[in-house]
Image: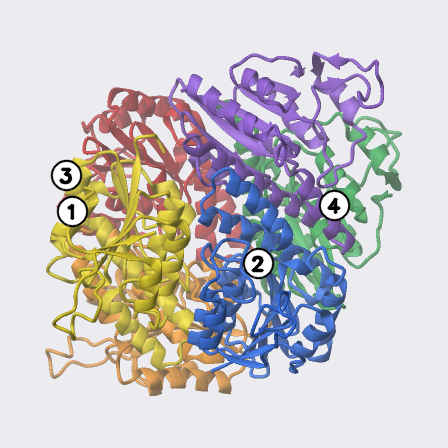
Chain colours: A green, B red, C purple, D orange, E yellow, F blue
C-alpha cells in the first residue's frame, strides 16, 4: 500500500441485484473511482431474494444452519461475479474466496468484489472484518432502509431516523434478531461486535446510487453513523 | 476400490430442483443404495431455471461466456449441496469442486454430489468425464425428455423415441446446438465427444423417480441407449 | 456416516496445554474412544498462554484485531498438532484448517484435532459451528472453571454454580465481554449465537480428565448445561 | 486492466520445444513485447513428442482418457516452465494452474506461460477459453502447418491454403478427428466450439519466429483466419 | 491407523519407468499387497531419463536449480500417475502433491504413489521424510545398483558390496556428490540427514521385481542396510 | 521483474523476536527500503525460543521430527506475521506459505515476510532456496553470532572470526551438527548444500540493526562471507 492509498469497504444489499437501481449503483461506483484515483474499494455483495429461495428449499430438506450459511455464501459470490463484470476495467475479474486472496487482489483505483467468506458470519460481518484487516478508512453499509430508526419505520409513521448512534444503543435495537442465514437486516450482532472491537468508522445508508456515490466521495447524506 | 465396488454416474436435470418430483427422486436414489450396498453413485446436478436467471442478468451486463459458465457452475453446486443434504447419511456432506476431491470422497454404499467443474464443460460433459475417470459401469443422464426422438416431440405428434443410437447419429441430431451456458439439452457436442472416446455405456432417460430407480438397479425403462 | 455413528465436539481450554493435567486428559479421551467404538470426536484446541504472549507482542507493534485472531488461530493449531500426536493411533495425524477438510477427516472410533478456523470466530465459536455442521450429539466446552456461576467465583465466596441455564440468561452474564483475540472466557457472544441457532446440546465443564471422560461417556458431572 | 492494455493469447505447438526454432521464437516474443509495451501475452504451451511418449506408456498399462489428459497437462506445464524461464524478465516466473491464478498473474508488458488446465480440454481449447475470459484481442494458434488447407498438404501436391474460413467449414474439415490426448492437430472440435461461441478473432499460423512476431505485432503473414 | 497396520515406503528408481522390468515390479508390489493385507505402501517414483532431458533443456535456457527441481518433481509425478494406473485397484487413483494429501490417502491394503514434494529435496529425501512422518516400519530404496559398494563397481572389478553400513560411513562415500536436480544416486546428503535424524530402518536394494517383493515381505536379499 | 529491480533475502534469527533489538531492526529495514527504492526484500523469520518450547512439549508426547519441523514452521510464520505488521506499508500483509505465493507477492520497494516452507528444511535452507529461485543478489543470514569463528567464541577467548570462507571449510566446521527441529545454528548442512549449488553470494552477520542496515545497503561490516 503506498502512502496515498485509502481503502473503503462498501457492503451492497442483496436486494440490489435484479433491481432497477442496480445499473445506477455500479455507475456511481465507477464514477467515484474515476474522481478519486487513489482509493481502493472492496465491494461486499449480499445474497438477496434468490439466496432466500435456495435457503428455504435447503431448509425444508433438513439442512443445518451452517449449510444454509454456505448456500448463502455461494449466492453472494454469484452476485459478486455479476458486480465485477458490471464494473468492467474498474474491477478485478476474480471474486476472492478468502481474506488472503482479497489482500492480494487489492490495487489502487480498482474495486474488488467479494461475497461471504465463512459460515457463521453474515456478509455484514464480512464487511466489518475486511474493514478491520485492510485498515479501511470507512465501512459503508448500504441497506434496504435509510439508516437506523428509533421504531420500525414500516410500522410506525412517527419513526425517526437516528443520525448518530453508539454500538451499545444499536445492539439494544437489533439484539433480538436471529442469526439465521438469509435473514440479517441492517447489522447483525456478530457484525456489530466486529465493528466495536476495531472501532471502524461505519455508515449505514440506503442502497441507492446517490447515497452511495456521496459516501464513496466522503460525505454522508442521510443514514446513520456509528460513533465510539 | 475393492473388487466388488461399482460406480454409477447419474446426471440430474437442473429442472428437477424446485420441482414436485424432487423428493421422490432422492428417495429413489437412497432406495437403490439400500438395495445394492456395493455401489458408489456420483450425482451430477444441473443448474436449472435459477442458473438461467443469473446467467441472463450477467449476460446483460456484458459477461463473457466463460464467466457465464462459472456462474452456471456455482448454481449447480448449490443444487448439489441441497441434494447431498436430502440424501442424509447416504451421501457425503461436502460437494467436491475438483476431480481430485471427488476421487477422495468416493466410498462404497454412498453417494457424492457435485455440480460443474470447469468452464467450457457442461454438467453433461462433467458426467461423461467423471464416468471415464472412475471407470464407471454406466453414465445415466436423466433429462427433461424421455430419451432421444427422431423429431422434436414437442412439435411433432408422430415423433418416435429411438431406443438405441450411435454417437454419430446423435451428433447429427444435436450438432446444431449452441454451447452457451445454461442452454444445453440432452447432450452437448463436448459431452458426446467424451462419451465417444471412453465408450462409456450411456443411458438417456427421463428425470423421474421410477426411471431413475430402475436405471440405478441396472434396468433401463424407456429412454435411449448410446451404442458403440 | 453410518447409522450407528455419533459425533461429539470437545473444546479444550488453551490453558490445558503445558499443564500437569494434560497427559491425564488425553488418556481420558483415548479411554472413552476405546469404550465407545462408534463415536467420532472433534477436539477443538484453544490458544492458551503462549497465544496471549504472541498476541501481546503483535498488538504492541500495531496489529489489527483480525491479524491478532489469525495469530491466535495459528497457536491453537500448534496445540491441536500436539494433541493429535498425543492421541497416537486414536487420532488423525493432520490438523484440518477448513470445515471441508474436517468433514473429510472424520472417521468412526477416531478423533480429529483442530484449532481456530477463521478470524472473527473464537475457538468456542468454532466448536459450536462444527457441532452444528456435523449434527453432533453434544458440544462439550471444557473450560478453566467448573461451569457458569451466578457471580464471579474468584471474587465471591458465596458464588453458586448454575446447573442448567438458558441462552438468554447466559448472554446476560457474559454480554459485556469483549471480543479481543485471546481473551474469550467460557463462551463469547458469537459462540452463544451459534449454539442458540442450532440448539445443540451444550455442556460447560471443568477441563480436567475425570469430568471430560464422564462427559464423553454421556454423563455430566458438575458443570452447566445450556437448555433451550 | 487499464484502458490501454490489450491481451493476446498465443498457443505454441508442443513440437516447438526441443526444436531448433525454439530460441528464435522466444526471442520473437520478447522482441514484440519490447516494441508494444501495452500488451499482455498469454502463452499456452502444447505437450509435444514427450507428452506422446508418456501417454503411450500410460495407455499401455490401462490408463483411461482422463488420466491421459492429466499426463498431457503436466507435460505441457513443464514446457510452460521452460518457456517462462527463456523469457527471463519478460515473463512471470510461476506457471498458473487455474484460470483464477492466470487472471491474477496478468500484467502489462509481460507474458504469462501456461499449459493445460483441465481434462477434456486440449491446450487449443485452453487457448480459446483464456481468450474468451480475458477478452483477448486475438487468439493466435501457432501450429505445425501454415494454416488450413483444402486437402492434406502432406499428401496432395495441389493442396491450397485457405486464407479465411468460417467455423462451419473448419468443423467439416476437422470433424472426424478424435479427441484422444496428445493427438489434437490444428483445432479440435471443443476448441472450435469455444471460438465459435465467443467469436474471438483467431489466426492459425505456422509456429516459426517470423510468423509469430508478425502476428504479435498485429499483421498476419500466411496462415488462416477464422471468420464469423 | 489401526493397531495392525504397518507402513512401508518404497522409493523406485526413475530408470524403472520405460524399462523392461517395469511390469514385473508392479506385479511384485500388488503380489505383496495380496499376501500381507495389513500393510500400506507409499510408492515414491523417481524422475528418470525423461526428467534429465527436460532438465538439460531448461538448464540451457538459464533455469536456476530450484526451477530444475520443480521440473524434476513434475516428471516424477507423471511417473507416479503411471504407477498408480498400473496398480489398478491396489492403488489410490490420485497422486498426492503434499504431505497432508498423502496422509489423507493412506489406507490399509492399498498403495499410494507420489513423486517429489518440494524443491531442494530429492525423491530419496521425500522417501525418508515420508517414512519419518508415517512412522514407517522401513524405507526401501530401490536403486540402479545392488546396494552400496566399497568402490565404484562399474570401474573396479574387486569392488565389494557392503552388507550393513552406518550413516557416517555412507556420508563419507557419497559426501562429494552434488545436489543438482536429476543427478542424485543412491542417497543424497539431504536424504541421509533425514534418515539419520529419524533412525528409520533403511534398505538400499536393486530395483528389480524379486528383490522388491522380498523386501516388501520383510526379507532383504542382497543390498545394503543402514544401521544406527 | 523490471530491469532495475534487485532482490535481497534476509534471514532473521528467531531470537530477535521478543528481544530489545527487534524494533531497531525493523526500523533499519524500512530505512533501507526508503533509501533504495528499487529493491525487493524477502524476510525469512526464524522460530526462536517459543518454537523450542512448543517443540520440547511435542517431543515429549512422541512427535516425530517431521511433525516437530511442522510446528517450527508454524511458529516462524507467526513471527513473520508480526514482522509484516511492524513494517506497515513497507511490507505485504500476507505471509506466503509456498514458493508460488511468495513469487506472486514480490513487488518493488516492498518486503515480504515468510517463515518456514516445508519439513526437512530449516529457515536457513528456506533463505537459500528463495535466494536461488528469485535470483537474489545476496542472501544475508543474520544470526546470533557475528559470523563464523575458527573456534567456538563462547568457549575460547582466542577464537577468531573468519572474514571469508569456502563452502567446504564451512561444512567441516558445522558438519557434526544435528538436523533436529529448532536447533540449527548459523547454517545447517542442507542450507549449505543449497548455497553451494546456486553459488548465491551469502553473508553471515550478527542480527543487530546496524549490521543489517549496512548489509541491505550493500556493505558488509563484520560477519563472514561465503566465497566460491
Residue B207 picture location, percent across and down? 32, 31
**Residue at the spot of label 1:** E213
Q: Chain of mark 1?
A: E
Which residue sits at x=56%, y=12%? C219
Q: Position of residue F17 (x, y in %)?
A: 69, 57
Query: Could you tell me which secondary element the residue under label 2 belongs to?
Result: loop
The CA span between labels 1 and 2 is: 42 Å
Q: Determine contact: label 1, label 3, CB under 8 Å.
A: no
Tag 3 residue: B164
Residue E108's x, y, as percent? 28, 35
Q: Chain of mark 4?
A: A
- Marks 1/3 same chain: no
C157 displayed left or right of D69: right
Residue shown at 84%/23% (left/top)?
C155
Q: Nearer the viewer, mark 4 or mark 3?
A: 4
Q: Nearer the viewer, mark 1 or mark 2?
A: 1
How far is the residue under mark 4 from the one under mark 2? 37 Å
Crowd band around label 2 with a 10 angstrom C-alpha radius: few (<14), some (14–19), many (20+): many
Quadrant of the rendered image containing residue A168: top right
Label 4 sits on residue: A141
Is residue D192 something that shows in the picture? Answer: no
Labels 4 & 2 near each other (Cβ < 8 A): no
Q: Residue under circle 2?
A: F115
Amino acid at each position: 500500500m503506498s502512502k496515498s492509498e485509502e481503502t473503503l469497504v462498501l457492503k451492497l444489499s442483496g436486494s440490489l441485484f435484479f433491481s432497477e437501481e442496480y445499473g445506477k449503483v455500479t455507475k456511481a461506483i465507477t464514477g467515484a473511482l474515476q474522481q478519486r484515483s487513489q482509493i481502493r474499494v472492496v465491494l461486499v455483495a449480499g445474497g438477496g431474494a434468490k439466496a432466500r429461495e435456495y435457503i428455504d428449499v435447503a431448509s425444508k430438506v433438513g439442512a443445518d444452519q451452517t449449510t444454509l450459511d454456505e448456500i448463502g455464501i455461494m449466492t453472494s459470490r454469484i452476485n459478486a461475479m455479476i458486480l465485477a463484470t458490471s464494473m468492467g476495467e474498474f474491477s478485478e475479474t476474480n471474486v476472492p474466496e478468502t481474506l488472503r486472496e482479497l489482500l492480494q487482489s487489492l490495487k489502487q483505483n480498482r474495486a474488488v468484489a467479494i461475497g461471504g467468506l465463512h459460515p457463521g458470519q453474515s456478509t455484514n460481518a464480512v464487511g466489518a472484518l475486511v474493514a478491520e484487516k485492510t485498515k479501511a478508512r470507512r465501512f459503508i453499509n448500504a441497506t434496504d432502509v435509510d439508516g437506523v430508526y428509533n421504531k420500525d419505520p414500516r410500522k410506525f409513521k412517527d419513526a425517526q431516523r437516528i443520525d448518530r448512534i453508539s454500538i451499545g444503543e444499536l445492539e439494544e435495537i437489533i439484539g433480538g434478531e436471529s442469526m439465521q442465514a438469509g435473514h440479517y437486516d441492517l447489522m447483525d450482532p456478530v457484525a456489530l461486535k466486529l465493528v466495536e472491537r476495531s472501532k471502524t468508522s461505519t455508515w449505514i445508508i440506503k442502497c441507492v446510487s446517490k447515497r452511495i456515490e456521496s459516501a464513496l466521495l466522503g460525505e454522508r447524506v442521510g443514514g446513520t453513523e456509528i460513533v465510539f
